[in-house]
Structure formats: C-alpha cells, structure tokens
Amino acid sequence: AQTVTQSQPEMSVQEAETVTLSCTYDTSENNYYLFWYKQPPSRQMILVIRQEAYKQQNATENRFSVNFQKAAKSFSLKISDSQLGDTAMYFCAFMKLPPNKLIFGTGTLLAVQP
Amino acid sequence: EAQVTQNPRYLITVTGKKLTVTCSQNMNHEYMSWYRQDPGLGLRQIYYSMNVEVTDKGDVPEGYKVSRKEKRNFPLILESPSPNQTSLYFCASSLRQGGSGANVLTFGAGSRLTVL
C-alpha cells in the first residue's frame, strides 16, 4: 500500500523569505501523480501544484516549485517570496490511476510571520 | 462556475439520528469521492464512485453509506451516527480518464459534523 509522510508538523518563515516543505512517499508503482494542496483557515482544499511521475522536469507554478526525486521517493515544495496569504496547512498527496484516489500525508502547518 | 457543492456546511446532531450530507457537481465528472479529515491523520477516503450505480469502499467506510443514482449527485449517509464520526468531511470529483484534468480532484468546501 502507498503511504505519504510529512515529517514537519509545523514550520515558520518570515515574509519574503523562502521555505521548503518535505514529503516522502512509498510505492511500488512506476506511473503516478503527486500533488501539494493548500488548506487555509477557510478549510477549502486548494491545488497548489502537481507532478506527473513520468516527467523528469520539476513542476513550477509562479512562486511554488517542487523538487521531485523519483528514485529517492521525495517530493518537496519550495515557496519563494513567502506572503502572509501563504499561511495554511499544506498537504502532500499521491495518486495512482485508476481509481483517482488521493492518499494524503498528515500535513505541515506553515505560518508566515510579518 | 464549475464547483462541488456540499450541504450542510455545519451540523450538530445526536448519536443515532440518521443524517445525509449532500454533494453535487456541475462539471459532468464521472468520478466522485468522500473524504474525512481528522487532526493528525490528514484526509482519508471513505467511499468513491467511478460512475453512476458504481460505488466502492475507501479506507474508512465503516458507519457510512453512499449512493450514485445520478451522475451529478453523491450523498453520504450516516445511518446511526456515533461520536467517532465527528469530523470534517469533503466531497471531491474529477474526470475519470482522458485529458489533463483526469487526475485533478475538485473539492467541495467541507462539512463540519459534530455528533454528541
């Protein structure tokens, strides 16, 4: 069975600084997808970034980028130029098709300090 | 606006009183799923549906029922709620296959359920 591990329950960063959230996963599959979701205080689940395992190039979305190391089964999220609005719980998640089941880590609570 | 709509958003009930949390999507998605979120555990899948009349258990199905009579609706039923079902519930949907959106789940806003 697949598992996702986020070893940092809480993190803090100063506004405008860069922070990296860690995620490791365990799977015997070769084709899968990885995601980072953001959950602000509103509790809405917001997709931050996704990565297809067959793509070697790391995904990037504006200030958010990932470091995908397939052999090491590592999928970290880097947030550059942190903003107060980035304060949220961040979940790493794994998906194998079919079905479209997401397996989540336990989350990292990120606080951006002014 | 493309969205997944859950109701109610908040509910306080008592042990044993049957309740239903509704979920509806307007994106013509084949796949729908329910998750529960508990502190320190992340989100865990309860049930999912690959299409109309096709449902299957997720990782924590005990105490829940679902149905998929129409493509757009996927209600979650708690026949006899217990306090350990106090949680935050999310409905999500996606295309089943084909295209870049097939693996992207759209989540509802969440339903906070308290069972006394």
Image (cartoon, coloured by chain):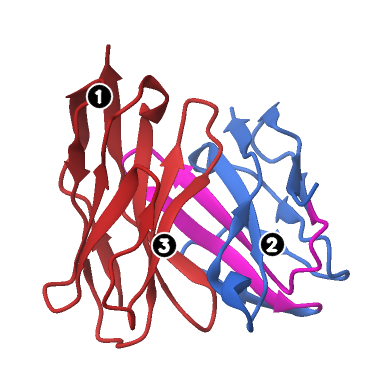
Residue B61 in view in this figure:
no
Distance from disc 2 to disc 3, alpha carbons, whole Å, reads 31 Å
Which residue lies under the disc numbered 2?
B65
Write the residue at 87% across / 71% down.
Answer: B69
Which residue is farthest right? B70
Whether residue B4 is visible to the viewer of this picture, yes or no, is yes
> Where does the magenta region start and end?
B24-52
Instruction: Give me the residue at 68% from left, 41% from top.
Output: B16
Q: Position of residue B100 (x, y in %)?
A: 58, 74
Quadrant of the frame with the C terminus of chain B: top right
Q: Please, is residue B99 above or below residue A112 in the view?
A: below
Q: Horizontally, is B58 left or right of A75 in the view?
A: right
Residue A67 % position (x, y): 21, 60
Main SS of the magenta segment? strand
| Residue B26 lies in quadrant | bottom right
Q: Which chain is red?
A: A
C-alpha distance separating marks 1 and 3:
23 Å
Shade of chain B as shown in the rendered figure:
blue
Q: Residue beneath label 1, please?
A: A16
